[in-house]
Each structure stands twice: as structure tokens, then as C-alpha cells.
Amino acid sequence: MANMQRPLSPHIQIYRWQAQMVSSIVHRATGVALAIGSVVVVYGLLKLAGDEAGFNEFRSLVGSPIGMVLMLGWSWALFYHLCNGIRHLIQDGGAGYAITQFVRSSWLSAIGSVVLTAMVWAYILTVGGAA
Amino acid sequence: MSNEKVVATDRRSPLKIALGLGSAHSGVHHWWVQRVTAAALVVLGIWFVILVLGLLGADYVTARSTLAQPWNALLMIAFVVAMFWHAALGLQVVIEDYVHTRWKEVFALVAVYFLAVLGALASVLAVLRIALTP
């Protein structure tokens, strides 16, 4: 085990919160949330491969108030991870590392994810009615 | 910096440098596959959202016949495989970063990979059944 008497580097509570640091933490958090959400994808596919009664059960579960709230959360998580994932792929290519660009792109993925989520749910609530 | 200086300060053997696999002996493989599956998921993720939105309120027969279309079945299989692969690689890094008790770390890593493979296989089996049975 590590010797705990050694000086440790400052942890997150020491630092002032910044967009670029929150974007990194949220990227991980949404990734974990989406991994858990993959259960819904598998469950839906298995129910669709089964009989009609089972699929209707799945539909009413997703369309229930709790189901809708969870789907709202997962849809935002998906769009955030998508937007910020594209941002990370661009950064992996070596671009956008100037501090101003880095902060601006952090905000861009946050705003983009909210806009996409709002668009999708506006469509669901107008066209789709109750899922 | 002269070439001579680099050789003098680098403590790695020439073979180690040539192989370029680092201390984990796997090189950039994990990092690279995470990026390749990410790139695939940008396209497949957008396709998945559009497919689901198109199936809003759809009944069993409509949803099933839509997914049974060859392109939809193919892309759905690609999506779930890329998704579980990417998820397992991502969760692996999270576990390696935050779980500091060795046996718990190994247990969590094995559990994540078991569940990811199981999830991917179950999804593929479901899509095949939808696509191949009338």
C-alpha cells in the first residue's frame, strides 16, 4: 500500500470550478450513465424479438412518467457525450488546444447538447404524443 | 537535442523502443479502439436516434417490420456491438482510475467485460431473430 503520510496533490475541492474541468467530469459521468442505459436498449430489442404483449409492456414502461423522466435524462446524456465526444476527437487530432478555444468548445458541447435535447423532446411532445 | 543525448538518457532497451508497447505491453491499442468505436458511434448514434424517433408510438408489427429491414438490422447490430465495445473500454478506464483495491478492481473489470459481451450477444441474437423470422 502507498504511504499515506506523503504529501498529496490537491484534489478537486481545491480548484475553482471551470468549464473545461466540468466538461471532462460530465463526459465521464454521462458515459457511465449511458453504459447503464444500454440495459434499456437490450431490453427493448429482446421484447421486440418476443411477442406483442411483451413489447407493449416495454412501451408502457418507457412511456410511464418515471420512464419518460429517465429517457429525458438519457437523451441529454447521449447528446452531451456525442457533442463532447466529437470535441475530443477533434482535440485528439491536435486541434483546439489554445485555452480560449478549449473553454469555448467546452461551452459549445454543453449548449449543443441542451439544444439537441430540447429539439428532440419538442418533436416527441408535438408529433409523437405519449410514447 | 542531439541524437547522442537521447540515447544516453533513455533507459529503455532498443527492442522496447522499437516495439513501442509501453509498461502495459499493449501500446496504444486501448486508446485507438476507443477512438475508432467513438467515430463509428457518432454516425450510428445519430442513426439510432432518428430510427427511434421514427418509431414513436409505433405498434409491435410496425416496429418489428421496420427493424427487420436489411439495412436497419445491419446498422442496429453494428450499433450495439460498437456501443458495448466502447462502453466496456470506457468503464475499464473509470474502474482503473477509481478502484484502488486490487481484487475489487479485477472483479469489477471482469464483471464489466462479461456483462458487455452478454449484452452485445443478447442484442445481436434479438436483432437476428427479428430480421430472420417473419
Image (cartoon, coloured by chain):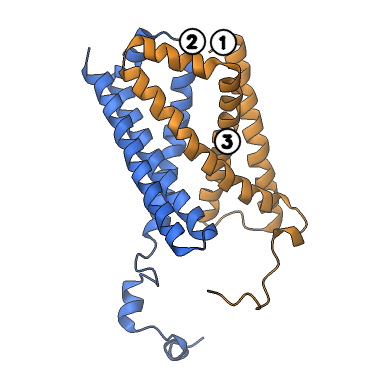
Chain colours: A orange, B blue
Q: Residues within 10 Å of mark 2 (few under 14, many from 20)?
A: some
Q: Position of residue A26 (x, y in %)?
A: 62, 45
**Helix, strand or loop status at disc 3:** helix
Q: Residue at x 65, y 24 (%)?
A: A118
Identity of the amino acid at label 2? Gly
**Does the image show residue B55?**
no
Residue with the mark numbered 3: A77
Q: Is residue A73 above or below residue B8?
A: above
- What is the number of the mark on residue A130? 1
- Residue farthest along the right direction in this orientation: A16
Q: Is residue A113 above or below residue A71?
A: below
Q: Which mark is residue B57?
A: 2
- On screen, residue A117 above or below B84: above
Same chain for the residues at labels 2 and 1, yes or no?
A: no
Using the image, name the chain to which the residue with label 1 belongs.
Answer: A
Judge the density around disc 3: few (<14), some (14-19), many (≥20) Cα neighbours within 10 Å. Answer: many
Give the distance between the C-alpha atoms of the residues marked 2 and 3, in whole angstroms.
23 Å
Q: Is residue B26 visible?
A: yes
Q: Is residue A68 left or right of residue B76?
A: right
Q: Residue at x 64, y 48 (%)?
A: A23
Secondary element at tag 1: loop
Q: Decide which of A8, A116 is in the foreground and name it.
A: A8
Residue that appears at 35% across and 10% down:
A52
Mark 3 is on which residue type? Ala
| Residue B27 locus on image (x, y percent) | 37, 65
Disc 2 and disc 1 in contact, CB within 8 angstroms: yes
C-alpha distance separating marks 1 and 3: 21 Å
**Relative to residue B121, is residue B60 depicted above or below?**
above
Left or right: where A28 falls relative to B46: right
In depth, the one of B30 and A115 nearer the eye is: B30
Q: Residue B23 appears at what percent x and percent y?
A: 40, 72
